[in-house]
Image: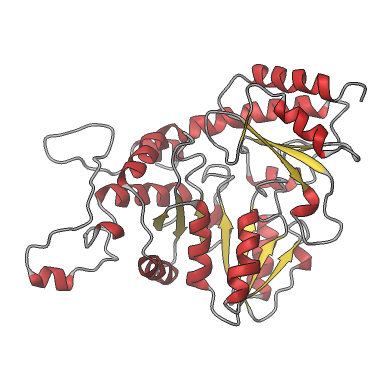
């Protein structure tokens, strides 16, 4: 089975003898019983066919890890309480004092803050790079980890991933490459086929799909990298609830359908927005006008349901907020991938470190499962009162 739509539905889960149903069972535990002391002494907690303690997992969480690994194209996966916790695990497991980590300048905001505060306090250096200029990567000998985002979670640039990865391998062979794969959801492109070492995924978004679960994952192929991640995961004492695992397992089979539907709706809204006189620029890599379009189209046929709308120079905070506040179908809130469309404003100067970065106000739309026509009507109605005369 090569198609991920099929893999997510026809996975190798085996129900107990005499019972067959679509959903895996929910196994909850803190204490796990051993038959004797020798069994307790010899049990390998890294063995996903064995059980040691509820924090390390039960058949329910192991099943979800296996399915996420298959979705990502990896061999191993670990579950964490959020996508940000997954990023933190990668940093803590793979970086040491004196190391240096490179992050794209459009990186997820909390990841930027983590580098500037926690990593810096631990003696780990960091630098931000322009993801659209792979030739400018400062690959010094102390760089041991490079983060990639495709697309950027706010401004939605889709970088030339093959060029970035090839450059890192050629000039910093000591460095591991980690990709935030939340936007692609394991569906838009094959990260491990491109040569990354680790992916993180905010399962809060598309895999959960309901806006009611916080969870993240870290996936990899290499056994030694997995051991470093898994040991750190165990020592930090992070775990997930089995009821949350059940919710993600329940929604995984519909992931490809939901992703495709939100992708198509987002493209319709992006195309509509391009034609509006009060829009400065529409940010979406599938648009032929996007500077990222060539890199995106070389790898992808799908895109996440996110649209960025940059507003004209001179637009004020009050104007941006009035447009968003006037929306009826779009709710105001963080995250994406759920059934309800969301809108949040960003002041671009607060997001970047490098010169010549985009400036001004933008609104990120996270498209849900509503009718695209109804969403466009909602956007147009509020805009008509706010941007009249533009």
Quadrant (top left/top right/bottom left/bottom right) for the C terminus: top right
Q: Quadrant of residue 309?
A: top right
Res 95 → quadrant: bottom right
Q: Residue at x 60, y 19 (%)?
A: 371
Where residue 123 appears, as percent x and y from the top left, is 60, 79
Residue 28: image location, x then y, percent? 23, 48
Q: Position of residue 374 (x, y in %)?
A: 65, 17
Residue 45 visible to the viewer: yes
Quadrant location, the N terminus: top left
- Residue at the left extreme of this rendering: 36
- Residue 173 visible in the picture: no
Q: Is residue 23 above or below residue 138?
A: above
State whether residue 387 is above or below residue 62: above
Q: Residue at x 19, y 33 (%)?
A: 20
Label total for image = 0
Q: Is residue 247 above or below residue 40?
A: above
Q: Residue at x 36, y 56 (%)?
A: 239
Instruction: Specify the color scheme.
Output: secondary structure
Looking at the image, the residue that sits furthest to the front is 318
Residue 51: x and y, percent?
A: 21, 59
Along the horizontal axis of the image, is 258 left or right of 316?
Answer: left
Direction from residue 278 to residue 156 in the image, left or right: left
Q: Nearer the viewer, residue 240 or 14?
A: 240
Instruction: Tell me the residue at 51%/48% (across/down).
Output: 202
Q: Is residue 303 above or below residue 140?
A: above
Q: Nearer the viewer, residue 173 or 384?
A: 384
**Residue 72 placement, left or right of 333:** left
């Amino acid at each position: 089975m090569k198609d991920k739509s099929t893999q997510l539905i026809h996975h190798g889960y085996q129900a107990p003898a005499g019972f067959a149903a679509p959903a895996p069972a929910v196994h909850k535990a803190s204490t796990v019983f051993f038959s004797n002391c020798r069994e307790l002494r010899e049990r390998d907690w890294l063995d996903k066919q064995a059980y040691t303690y509820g924090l390390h997992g039960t058949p329910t969480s192991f099943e979800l890890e296996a399915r996420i690994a298959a979705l990502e194209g990896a061999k191993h996966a670990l579950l964490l309480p959020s996508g940000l916790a997954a990023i933190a695990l990668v940093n803590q497991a793979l970086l040491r004092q004196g190391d240096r980590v490179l992050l794209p300048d459009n990186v997820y905001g909390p990841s930027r803050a983590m580098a500037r505060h926690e990593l810096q306090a631990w003696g780990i250096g960091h630098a931000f790079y322009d993801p659209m200029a792979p030739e400018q990567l400062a690959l010094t000998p102390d760089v041991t980890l490079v983060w990639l985002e495709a697309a950027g979670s706010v401004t939605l640039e889709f970088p030339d991933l093959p060029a970035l990865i090839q450059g890192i391998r050629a000039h910093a062979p000591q460095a591991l490459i980690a990709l935030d794969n939340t936007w692609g959801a394991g569906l838009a492109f094959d990260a491990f086929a491109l040569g990354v070492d680790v992916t993180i995924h905010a399962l809060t978004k598309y895999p959960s799909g309901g806006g009611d679960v916080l969870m993240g994952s870290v996936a990899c192929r290499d056994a030694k990298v997995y051991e470093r991640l898994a040991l750190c995961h165990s020592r930090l004492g992070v775990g997930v609830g089995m009821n949350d695992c059940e919710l993600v397992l329940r929604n995984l089979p519909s992931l490809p359908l939901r992703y495709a539907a939100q992708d198509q709706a987002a493209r319709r809204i992006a195309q509509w927005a391009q034609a509006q006189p009060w829009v400065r620029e529409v940010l979406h890599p599938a648009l032929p006008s996007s500077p990222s379009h060539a890199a995106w189209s070389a790898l992808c046929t799908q895109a996440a349901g996110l649209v960025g709308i940059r507003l004209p120079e001179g637009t004020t905070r009050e104007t941006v907020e009035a447009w968003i506040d006037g929306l009826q179908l779009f709710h105001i809130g963080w995250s994406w991938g759920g059934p309800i469309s969301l809108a949040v404003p960003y002041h671009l100067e607060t997001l970047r470190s490098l010169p010549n970065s985009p400036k001004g106000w933008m609104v990120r739309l996270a498209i849900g499962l509503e009718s695209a026509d109804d969403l466009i009507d909602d956007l147009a109605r509020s805009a008509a009162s706010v941007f009249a005369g533009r």
